[in-house]
Image: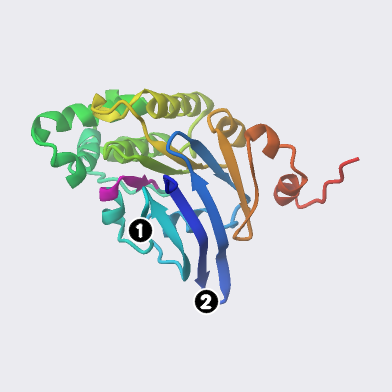
Amino acid sequence: MAPFFEVENLTKRFGGLVAVNNVSFQIGRDEIVGLIGPNGSGKTTLVRCVIGIFKPESGKVRFKGEDITGWRPWKVVQRGLVGTFQVVKPFRRLPVIANVMVGCLCPRITKGGEWTKTTVVKARDALECVGIADRAREPASTLSHGDLKRLEVARAIATEPELLILDEPFGGLNPAETELVAKSMKRLHKGGRVGRLHSEGPAMLIIEHKLMELMKIVDRVIVINYGEIIAQGTPEEIVKMPTVIEAYTGKEVLIA
């Protein structure tokens, strides 16, 4: 059986700079996987190759057994793979809930029929999931940076993804907000998708610099540095690996 999600020998260059170098990994249907690494290590470039923002020079991206390498972003979303961005760009003049309703208009959702009656419900479910349902009718321009990050996550999950890729979802959040969003992700993963139409939540790939918070919710961690994977393992294994510690501190670690 083909892996649920697979990246095989993916490479992306910008001129003479190799941003992603021959990267390969898999994600299971029931996993939450963390993707970590120092600033500039190639994490975001890798994800943008996966979701169709960048076209890789070589390698393959396969999702549910299908080669989606080089697909345009909207086609990737239609297949059930959705990603968020570090820099959020909402429709600032629209109400918060209207921003999320846009995601509910994805063709893979509307083809089910009776969608006009459920769009508002799904959008509100998504906002409740990330904890900003009380701001639903306010213009998006009134939200703080932290709440805009939560809105970005809500917009993504409104499309009912099967694989959700989150680029620094905790960025700009205070500790209480971070804990709320982290718990929401676990609940979404285990307890079903927005709209309560499916019993199985999405698999997740999460890029994050808040490592303590990330390690509490992921099953496995992939570490990337200088565009290459340098380590993979459980959170408990990763935090003890000398190669990982050296990548973050810049100092060689000696194990007695």
Q: Residue at x 20, y 44 (%)?
A: 108
Nearer-N-terminus badge (1/2)? 2
For the point 21% across and 36% down, the residue is 95
Q: Amino acid at mark 1?
A: Ile
The residue shown at (48%, 35%) is 31
Membership of 51 in magenta stretch: no
Q: Is residue 146 left or right of residue 155?
A: right
Percent of width and height locating residue 44:
49, 54
Query: Which residue does the numbered mark 1 point to in the structure image?
Result: 68
Please say if the residues under marks 1 and 2 sit with CB atoms less than 8 Å apart: no
Going by the picture, which residue comes out furthest to the front?
1
Q: Is residue 83 visible?
A: yes
The residue depicted at 14 percent of the width and 29 percent of the height is 118
Q: Which residue is mark 2?
A: 15
Instruction: Give amino acid for label 2.
Output: Gly
Q: How far across and down, in percent of the image, does residue 1 sit?
A: 42, 46
Residue found farthest to the right: 256
In the rendered image, is residue 136 in sight? no
Answer with the quarter of the image where residue 159 lies.
top left
Choose between 118 and 149: the one closer to the eye.
118
Mark 1 closeness class: few <14, some 14–19, many ≥20 residues within 10 Å: some
Mark 2 crowdedness (10 Å alpha carbons): few <14, some 14-19, many ≥20? few
**Disc nearest the viewer among 1 and 2:** 1
